[in-house]
Image (spheres, grey):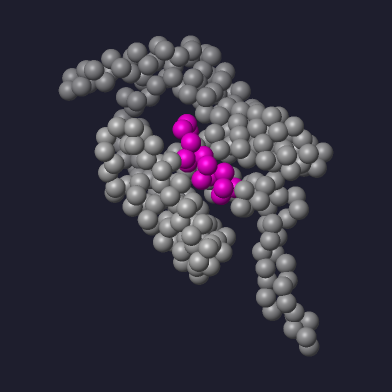
Amino acid sequence: NPSNPDADADADEVAHLGVKPITGACLIISWLATLITLIVVESNTDYATNKELHWFSTFWRVGSIIFGGGQVVLPLLLSDVVQYETACAARDAVTNVCTSYVTAETATSWITEQQFFAGLALAQAMPGPLFNFSAYIGALAARRAGKNVIVGAMCAWFGLFGPGVMLIFAVLPFWGKFRKWKTYKRALPGLNASAVGLVVSAAVSIVLKVIEASPFPKATVCIGLMCAFGSHVVQLPKGALTLIQAPIVIVVGGLLGLLAHAAEAT
């Protein structure tokens, strides 16, 4: 590329940083074989007797299909680790027909919805990638199941991170040529747009779930808007405060939640 020779030089350098092409191909095959094997085995085994396998399999599957960033993983994780069932809440006295339904967590749910969102807030306030949230889920799932929490955390953490790490090293030997492929260049704007769309979709899904689970939904919406303003509009003085702006916003949101509870806001 005459207009940007540095970009080509960087691509060539990246292409030689990883493993050899044959090793990269083996990594791709290993990742895919592991994914297929885990899906087949999980579908033919019972969760009650193979909890560790189901934890690792679920997080490996989620980690394999994520595209668009860490936030996209949240709705998928929520649907996998918190199971719901719909039951009849009231019946007509004459016809015995159900007139209202209620959705509740099942006894086999790995963790509760409240624990999920509490861990999400904690993960957002802590340093490191959002994927570390998986270790929290694995530990809680293991504790609820009466298993070793370290084993649960490792199953979830390695399961979610494993596919991405394998595929990064697998693709590196081919990246120098792949990034010059005209079809890829033409598709890149669409890929970027789809990634943004997935993040927005995940955010909307989680927001609706949080509002639904909140005992004071109106106050929850107000707190969410204030925290969004505090993290994206408010500019703190450059220095140490800037580095901890996100944790500050999380703490302020928690304090506002305490005030809402105290005032019994609705």
Specify the farthest residue to the left: 3
- Residue at point 53%, 19% (across, down): 25
Identify the main secondary structure in magenta: helix
- Residue sitting at x 52%, y 24%: 165
Q: Residue placed farthest to the right in the image?
A: 49
Locate residue 235 relative to residue 114 in the image: left or right: left
Report whether 100 appears left or right of 64.
right
250 part of magenta stretch: no
| Residue 42, x across and y down, in percent | 73, 38
Kindly identify the residue that appears in the image at 76 percent across and 53 percent down. 107
View extreme (bottom): residue: 94
Q: How many marks?
A: 0
Work out whether residue 41 can be spotted.
Answer: no
Q: Residue 136, can we see it?
A: yes
Q: Is residue 176 above or below residue 149?
A: above
The quarter holding residue 97 reads bottom right
Q: 198 or 106: which is nearer to us?
A: 106
Say which quarter of the image contains residue 154.
Answer: top right
Q: Is residue 128 magenta?
A: yes
User: x, y (%) of residue 222?
Assistant: 41, 61
Q: Residue at x 34, y 32 (%)?
A: 240
Q: Give the range drawn in magenta.
A: 116-129
Q: Where is residue 48 in the image (x, y as percent from the top left)?
A: 80, 42
Left/right placement of residue 84 relative to residue 46 reads left
Report x, y in % for residue 261.
Answer: 53, 62
In this view, the residue in front, 167 or 187, is 167
Q: In this view, does 256 lie above or below 68?
A: below
